[in-house]
Image (cartoon, rainbow, N blue to C red):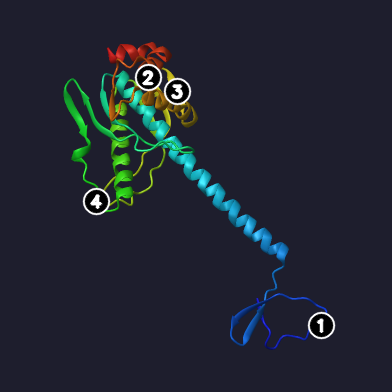
Amino acid sequence: MQSISGYNPLSAFHAVRLTRTSENEYVINSESEKDQFKTETKAKSYQVEMLKAKRNSKNRDAAQQAFLIGMAASFGYQIDINKLYKKGKTTSQLFTINSISKDNKFLFKTHDVVPEVEDLRDKRRCLDAVTNSTLLDIIIATIGVKVCEKKCRISKYGNSIGMRRIKALRFGGCNFSTKEITEFGNRIHNNILNHMGTKSCIIDDSCNDITAFFRQNNESVSSIVH
């Protein structure tokens, strides 16, 4: 951008684009239309990539949650899950877990979680992070399971934890990368939807279409569970 004031005279046939900044002042826009188009295209491309990355991250989180639910169920836990409040067309939603129990003993209840935020969306994210952490701790505490976690960002929700994500998981001789957890988790997520009632469902070791995956892939897991 350059002000007309003090600017060298141009040919009458030299076209320039002016931008009015005030009543008696104009500014010459020195950026060509081609450069402007490139800048705008680059900005739009960046926005698209950021949106895609955000969606992929949410999809991985939903798949990891389903993977952990299926794994916990195969270890004898009962997970009470609410029906999704909406089903995304491009992004998978995380389930709201009401409770996690084993042998009639509750290890987690949603009502016990008190988020230190006011915004409803932030409360949901906080609850998602807490339930995810609870499931992960249950799996890590199981004999024969080794988990390598990604570095977790500091949570913006007060003293609450951030969303913990698995980098690699090993149990009974089977190794799972983030990609494999996402692939298998997506299948389990869909199977959980098939079990869903009008309001909720309970996933446990009787849900063979969910738990059989872990038993079929490693006989030692079955010996740990039973």
Q: Earlier in the sequence, mark 4 or mark 2?
A: 4
Q: Earlier in the sequence, mark 4 or mark 1?
A: 1
Foreground disc of the pair 2, 3: 2
Q: Nearer the viewer, mark 4 or mark 1?
A: 1
Mark closer to the observer (3, 4): 4
Q: Quadrant of the C terminus?
A: top left
Is label 3 in contact with label 1 (beta carbons under 8 Å)?
no
| Left or right: 18, with 213 as reference point | right
Q: Distance between the Cα atoms at labels 4 and 1?
A: 66 Å
According to the picture, the residue beneath numbered tag 2 turns out to be 210
Residue 33 in the image: above or below residue 212: below
Quarter of the figure with residue 36:
bottom right
The answer, for residue 141, to whether it is visible in the render is: no
For label 2, the SS is helix
Cα gap from disc 1 to disc 2, whole angstroms: 77 Å
Judging by the rendered image, the residue that carries numbered circle 3 is: 175
Residue 60: image quadrant is: top left
Residue position marked by numbered label 1 in the rendering? 12
Amino acid under disc 2: Ile
Q: Residue furthest left?
A: 104
The location of residue 140, given as percent across then percent down, is 31, 28
Q: CA distance from mark 3 to mark 4?
A: 37 Å
